[in-house]
Amino acid sequence: MIEMARKSAEDAELTRQNLVAAGIQFFAEHGYAGTTLEMVSQRAGVTRGAVYWRFKGKDALLRTVLDDCVLPLEDFLDQGASFEEGMAQLRGAMSRTLHHQQSRQICELMLQKSERVDDLSPIALRLHDAQDRFHEQLKALLGRGVSRGELVANLDVRVSSQILQVCFTGLIVECLRQPLESTHHLESTLNALCVMFKGAFIPTS
């Protein structure tokens, strides 16, 4: 009995994961308006009734999709990391965000297929939250670097973190136009950005 219950719970969780994965894919490809629960159920290999059993409707599925996926860029900075280590962590998180299929699809949904009509839509709110998390980590990285003497003492942390955020957000948008398998453009641009910011932020001896 216990084994059957465990198997049933595992099957239910697998079905949920398949539905969320299908939802991410279709929302990213077709937007909210262009996605139907019929499309999602067929891709997940279940009936539409099974979708409604787990989600009240398309809006509930969308909210689950948005809540379940935390982008690497939202949580890249280790406590205690130096500026050099933090920049390496930022580069790694950027690469993972754009090369992990579901993370990339969430970016496509938030940045290219939002279809938002106001700033209170679920996608707009999720994008705002992701941007805030990313920006707070950039401020922490730069602020820590200044306090440790790793960066120039007169660095305007607020403005500099905003510039960094704009640059990396722009790079994400640009890379979303490229095939998932394309890596040269991303890596070369990341290298150039890191060299540029190090030259501007790190004190010269």
Image (spheres, grey):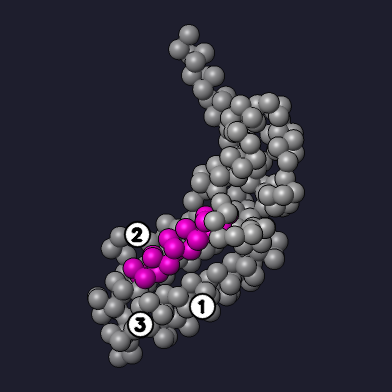
Quadrant that contains the C terminus = bottom left
Q: Answer above or below: position of 57 versus 172.
A: above
Q: Is residue 124 magenta?
A: yes
Instruction: Provide residue 122's location: percent of width, then percent of height.
Output: 56, 51
Q: Which residue is mark 2?
A: 78
Between residue 139 and residue 93, name the one nearer to us. 139
What amino acid type is highlighted by mark number 2?
Answer: Asp
**Regarding mark 1 in the picture, which secondary structure is present there?**
helix
Query: How would you classify the magenta stretch by its main secondary structure?
Result: helix
Q: Which residue is mark 3?
A: 156
In the image: residue 70, left or right of residue 172: left
| Residue at position x 64%, y 30% in the image | 52
Q: Earlier in the sequence, mark 1 or mark 2?
A: 2
Instruction: Provide residue 100's location: percent of width, then percent of height.
Output: 58, 53
Q: Residues within 10 Å of mark 3 (few under 14, many from 20)?
A: some
What is the number of the mark on residue 193? 1
Residue 143 image-quadrant placement? bottom left
Query: Magenta residues?
Result: 123-141
What amino acid type is highlighted by mark number 3?
Answer: Asp
Q: Name, please, the residue furthest toward the bottom.
A: 205
| Residue at position x 65%, y 31% in the image | 51
Instruction: Provide residue 116's location: percent of width, then percent of height.
Output: 63, 58
Q: Residues within 10 Å of mark 1 (few under 14, many from 20)?
A: some
Q: Earlier in the sequence, mark 2 or mark 3?
A: 2
**Regarding mark 3 in the picture, which secondary structure is present there?**
loop
Q: Nearer the viewer, mark 2 or mark 3?
A: 3
User: Could you tell me how far apart the alpha carbons at marks 2 and 3 are, in whole angstroms?
Assistant: 22 Å
Between residue 140 and residue 94, name the one nearer to us. 140
| Residue at position x 51%, y 22% in the image | 9
